Amino acid sequence: MPIIDLIEYLDQTGQSMCHRYPEEGSAAIKWGAQLIVRENQWAVFFRDGKALDVFGPGRHTITTLNIPILTAMVADPLFGDSPFRAEVYFVSRQVFTNQKWGTAEPIVFRDSEFKMIRLRAHGMFSIQITDAQLFVNKIVATQGIYHTSDIQDFLRGFIVGRLNDLLGSTLDSLLDLPRYYDELSAGLKARVKDDFAQYGLETVDFVINAITPPEEVQKVIDERSGMEAVGGMAQYMQFKAARAMGDIAQQGGGAGGGGGAGETATAGMGLGMGAGLGMMMPGMIGQAMQQGAQPKIRCHNCKNDIPADSKFCPNCGINLAETVKCPKCGKDWPAGSKFCPDDGTSLAGEQKK
């Protein structure tokens, strides 16, 4: 086996988190060999299965000057030029972006509006290795090459598990979800911080792209949106009934000649209904739209729909202009916020103003 006197590694993929040198077994490294570490790397030096030192960027000479523990471990029959067997793990310092996460199975969520529903969620995050020796010892072990794809499933398990808890403590209804996306992202990033740190990792960015209910629940939401658009349940049912009657009239009015007396009567009824409804429908639709024209907002305290220009909720009386201050960054956020959208700090119990 050749004696190594120069050790370095260049990652051509951009996805290698750790590369072991050599990939199999150990190398006969010359006493005084040169170790070259790039700006985006650490080098963790192992001998006899024990991590001796972590090297930062630069050129390093393998001697007792930078690895003092080697003095008692290396025999020196060749006047300081003897080889010894060791391994070097090159660990990347770069930020690994565009890592995907998502729920393999739907999450069961207790919704105040729709009761028990199942949600799916997905998003992206960025990670960075902050403790090279801890990462090698706990994650990489003796593998020759370790890529981001090797750890995604492991980290995804932490994210989905914490998301279950966060949704239950933050969200009351799926209908409130759009205004909570930033807050949920910040809260979830804060919750997985310690989970990742125990393996020498840090979450740099974290984004929730979507949290979606099943298709049947989406249809119910669409129905509810239609009700709100025309002013409520009564107007919505009136609008749907008018449309259905108009469809019946059109079908009946399309009957052609050549049929019997029954068909002729049906055609006449269809024409009559179509003519009558054609005159009635504009008024019905206009009345429904006029009643539902006033814009609405949802009270963050009692969750009831109220006029958009309200200063106080007519149902619970809460001041809609109240805010809470983040104790960490000092920014003001709407009252009822559970986490700071900027840094993920919990706002529970903070003073309202």
Image (cartoon, rainbow, N blue to C red):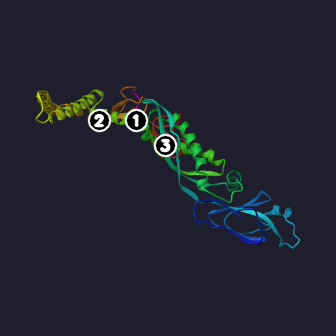
Q: Position of residue 352 (x, y in %)?
A: 48, 34
Marks 3 and 2 sit apart, C-alpha to C-alpha, by: 28 Å
Q: Nearer the viewer, mark 3 or mark 2?
A: 3
Instruction: Tell me the residue at 64%/67% (across/down).
Output: 38
Amino acid of disc 1 = Glu
Element at label 2 = helix
Q: Position of residue 302 (x, y in %)?
A: 42, 28
Query: Does residue 308 appear anywhere in the picture?
Result: no
286 vs 149, nearest the viewer: 149
Q: Which residue is mark 1?
A: 216
Element at label 3 = strand
Q: Which residue is mark 2?
A: 229
Q: Position of residue 284 (x, y in %)?
A: 19, 31
* Span shown in magenta: 317-321
Q: Residues within 10 Å of mark 1 (few under 14, many from 20)?
A: few
Q: Does residue 111 belong to the magenta stretch?
A: no
Q: Residues within 10 Å of mark 3 (few under 14, many from 20)?
A: some
Marks 2 and 1 sit apart, C-alpha to C-alpha, by: 20 Å
Q: Is residue 14 above or below residue 312?
A: below
Q: Does residue 318 belong to the magenta stretch?
A: yes
Q: Is residue 174 above or below residue 64?
A: above
Amino acid of disc 2 = Ala
Q: Residues within 10 Å of mark 2 (few under 14, many from 20)?
A: some
Q: Is residue 191 above or below residue 30?
A: above
The disc placed on residue 121 is 3
Q: Is residue 167 above or below residue 89?
A: above
